[in-house]
Amino acid sequence: MSTKELIAAKIESLSEEDLDELYALVKNFAESKNHASSPDVDDERAGWARLAAASLARAYGDDEPEYSLEDVVP
């Protein structure tokens, strides 16, 4: 039996209230899949990655002192 058939069989036993809840979950899942693969999301992720890298570079520049293990572990 395919996954689609297994899901259809389970759906047959659900109440109308449960079906409404399931529909909302499936709709949100499908929308998140469509949203996650859009170019806008990829651009936004790239922007956040650039911001994080720039912030890290500012926080830990080339002139940072070197710390030994004894300096950080009591």
Image (cartoon, rainbow, N blue to C red):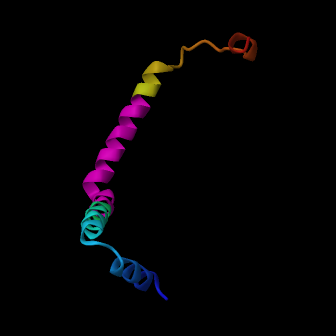
Q: How many labels sit on residues?
A: 0
Decide if residue 12 is on the left or right side of residue 69.
left
Given residues 39 and 11, the one toward you in this image is 11
Decide if residue 74 is on the left or right side of residue 1.
right
Residue 43 is covered by the magenta coloring = yes
Give the residue displayed 39% in from the left and 40% down from the top: 49
Residue 5 is covered by the magenta coloring = no
The residue sitting at the bottom extreme is 1
Given residues 61 and 37, the one toward you in this image is 37
> Which contiguous range is marked in magenta?
31-54
Q: Is residue 38 above or below residue 60?
A: below
Give the residue displayed 29% in from the left and 72% down from the top: 15
Most common secondary structure along the magenta stretch? helix
Q: Quadrant of the C terminus?
A: top right
Q: Is residue 56 above or below residue 2?
A: above
Given residues 17 and 54, the one toward you in this image is 17
